[in-house]
Image (cartoon, grey):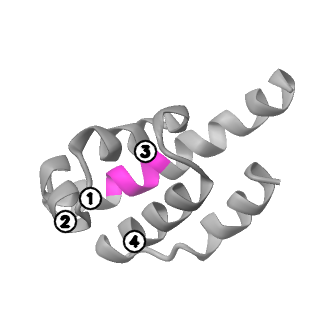
Amino acid sequence: SDAGSEVLNPVVQSVGELLSAARKARGLEVVDVAQMLKLGPRQVEALENGDWQGLPGHTFIRGFVRNYARLVQIDSAPMEIFFFIFFS
């Protein structure tokens, strides 16, 4: 429902902001992350901006976030809890 997605949007946004902040703290550009993760820059931007509707499916998003977190050296475990809620 719309009400449910409204509640979760801030969480989607915060996951993206966390990844973006970690990327910037390591002096990486979106294109650097895209190249290292073998993704398009638009996909990286969509994740950081919380625009997940444009990304190809839950499995992709979950793997993408996990790999991105590993790349910028932050713990993806808290995000796993979010995925359980968001994708159930």
Q: Quadrant of the N terminus?
A: top right
Task: Work out how far the residue at label 2 is from the one at label 3, CA to CA, in angstroms.
Answer: 18 Å
**Lower position in the chain sequence, tag 4 or tag 3:** 3
Q: Main secondary structure of the magenta part?
A: helix
Residue type at the position of mark 3: Leu
Secondary structure beneath label 2: loop
**Foreground pick, 10 / 34:** 34
Q: Quadrant of the C terminus?
A: bottom right
Nearer to us of marks 2 and 4 is: 4
- Side of 18 relative to 71 (left or right): right
Q: Are marks 2 and 4 in contact (CB under 8 Å)?
A: no
Report which residue position mark 2 lands on. 26
State the mark number for residue 67: 4
Relative to 8, does residue 84 appear above or below in the rendering? below
Task: Work out how far the residue at label 1 is from the one at label 2, CA to CA, in angstroms.
Answer: 5 Å
Residue type at the position of mark 4: Asn
Residue neighbourhood size for the residue with mark 4, other residues' Cα within 10 Å, grouped as few (<14), some (14–19), many (≥20):
some
**Lower position in the chain sequence, tag 2 or tag 4:** 2
Name the residue rendered at 66%, 34% in the picture. 9
